[in-house]
Image: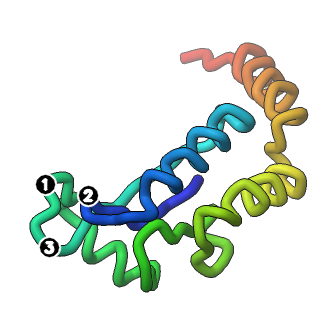
Amino acid sequence: MIEYYSGTWCGNCPCAHQALSDIKNTYPQTIALSYHGGGNDPWQNFNGDQVRTLLGFSASAAGIIDRTSNQVGYSSWMTRVSDRYANSQMSPGKSQCYCQKLQLNYQNFRHDD
């Protein structure tokens, strides 16, 4: 999951959106959350400013990966996401097996009233 701070007034955000597109193409399971806040941004989220404060964003187009790191600029997102998937129990190569195991375990479970 990538959480990042954005705004319609943000000059770097189109580059961040392209970085997210590249990540989603490589890792389609990735979830991206964009928090808009500040000023008169028409896309301002109801809690954009609170989340920005909570996560400590100091600049737009900065993001946090899985809430496990400090904020990083969009040019580092792909590297950070790749590292997270490589070191995760749910890396792309493992997720299908894990999901099949969960499905099999669910199907084998019976509840008799």
Res 45 → quadrant: bottom left
**13 displayed left or right of 42:** right
Taking 20 as reference, is 101 above or below it? Answer: above
At x 80% / y 33%, what residue is drawn? 95
Disc 3 versus disc 1: distance between alpha carbons? 9 Å
Disc 2 versus disc 1: distance between alpha carbons? 8 Å
Residue 8: assigned label: 2
Res 53 → quadrant: bottom left
Q: Percent x, y for residue 80?
A: 75, 62
Q: Earlier in the sequence, mark 2 or mark 3?
A: 2
At x 88% / y 57%, what residue is drawn? 87
Neighbourhood count class around disc 2 (C-alpha, 10 Å): few under 14, some 14–19, many 20 upward: some
Residue 39: assigned label: 3
Determine whether the residue tagged by mark 2 lies in a helix, strand or loop.
Answer: loop
Determine whether the residue tagged by mark 1 lies in a helix, strand or loop.
Answer: loop
Res 11 → quadrant: bottom left
Is there a contact, CB below 8 Å, between mark 3 and mark 1?
no
Q: Earlier in the sequence, mark 2 or mark 1?
A: 2
Taking 78 as reference, is 110 above or below it? Answer: above
The residue carrying mark 1 is 42
